Amino acid sequence: MRKLKLGSSEVEVSALCFGTDLIGSKTDRETSFRLLDLFCESGGTFIDTGNFYAAWLPGCKGGESETTIGLWMKERGNRHEMAIATKMGFDYPGCAGGLSAAEIERECDKSLRRLGTDRLDLYYAHRDDRETPLEETMAAFDGLIRAGKVRAIGASNLRSWRIAEANAVAAAHGWTRYVAVEQRHTYLRPRHGADFGPQVAINEDLKDYCGSRDITLIAYSALLQGAYTRQDRPVPAQYAGPDADERLEVLRDIGKESGATLNQVVIAWMRQSAPPVLPIIAGSVPGHVAENIGALKVTLSEDQILRLDSAGNPDIKKAWLR
Ligand SMILES: NC(=O)c1ccc[n+]([C@@H]2O[C@H](COP(=O)([O-])OP(=O)(O)OC[C@H]3O[C@@H](n4cnc5c(N)ncnc54)[C@H](OP(=O)(O)O)[C@@H]3O)[C@@H](O)[C@H]2O)c1
């Protein structure tokens, strides 16, 4: 699997990231290890977890995912080969949440312990916190970098202008800035005003900002829980907008032409978009994960990208041709 640098940092990650929110909880340990092995054997090194995964499940208290990844890396002796991203900011048992310096420092130590490591490759603010001054948050993240506990920082579920302000604050003080942004993103576009609770979707502003400032864009919920191919997973209502049918039709056409599955076309489209978006793939079934990794073999033509981009949005076509 091809490797790339995260934004302007020196952290090298694989072209796909493996999402693990249900690892060690809904997905049992044996299956979790099997899935992690599969990703790793395919050359994958970039793993996405979070401090509170999966506190929302009955019987879980958070930390299950990090703990399982830590055990897997210990058993396989492969920590040095992996690029581990984790996050903090949401509340869960024993943690009030938010981006205060005290929470950032405390949660980082907890994540390091659970993962059985002394350094996080990427540490995200998992949500915004408008009660805490940006100076406090960015100084705390910078402190972790200087202490050698974290190699790079990222933002998840923050609006573009808040990321830009945070990075401006960091630059003014000579502190480390966010080099990666992880948001919700898929091929179907959210309906105007769609509500995703605390989650924030990639939009044109963010693409422009990240593309101009050498910040890596990373997408979660890329496959809408399998809705592109599964009868049992309807397209979420937030994506059932006026252009959804047209976009699905073009997606199916390109799937037929390219011989790729719809999930693979979505992943390939994301990777080839401008700026490129690094998809997080996830799954509890090895066959699904293998299919998603197989997307790396799919290369869409310029014409196919244009058709995918302009479906339900003919003005994009004009912009390309100008
Ligand atoms: N930063 C954030 O706020 C945030 C938010 C959400 C997620 N994330 C990260 O992103 C990761 C993925 O999130 P997500 O679960 O929402 O992603 P998703 O791509 O929308 O859904 C993944 C699920 O879709 C199904 N699936 C995947 N590939 C498939 C295939 N080829 N064929 C059929 N079904 C397929 C599987 O469901 P089953 O396993 O049920 O079969 C899989 O678990 C998480 O693990 C987490 O690391 C981050």
Image (spheres, rainbow, N blue to C red):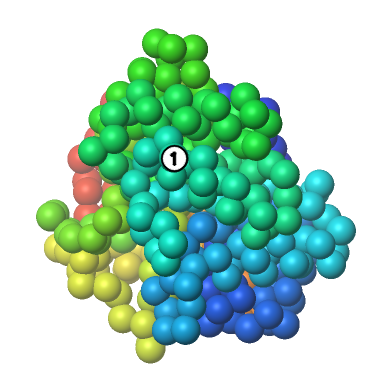
Q: Quadrant of residue 166?
A: top left
Q: Residue at x 39, y 74 (%)?
A: 56
Quick check: 309 above or below 298?
above
Residue extending farthest to the right is 77
Where's residue 216, x and y in %?
A: 50, 36
Please tell me which residue lies in front, 64 or 26: 64
Task: Report whether residue 273 is seen.
Answer: no
Query: Cβ(mark 1) to ligand 1 < 8 Å?
Result: no
On the rendered image, what quadrant is the C terminus found in? top left
Q: Classify mark 1: residues with Cα within 10 Å, few (<14), some (14-19) or many (20+).
A: few
Please report the residue visible at 13 percent of the width from the left and 55 percent of the height from the top: 193
What percent of the width, then of the height, locates residue 292? 59, 66
Rendered view: 61 above or below 164? below
Amino acid, disc 1: Ala
* Residue 142 seen from this side: yes
SS at badge 1: helix
Q: Residue at x 20, y 72 (%)?
A: 237
Q: Which corner quadrant of the image does residue 281 belong to?
A: bottom right
**Which of the two residues, 197 or 15, is positioned nearer the viewer here?**
197
Residue 261 lies left or right of residue 307; in this view the side is right
Q: Position of residue 212 (x, y in %)?
A: 41, 23
Q: Is residue 289 left or right of residue 97?
A: right
Tell me: residue 33, above or below residue 77.
below
Judged left or right of residue 153, residue 98 is left
Residue 73 on image: x %, y %: 78, 61
- Which residue is located at x 61 percent, y 76 percent? 24
- Read off the residue under disc 1: 102
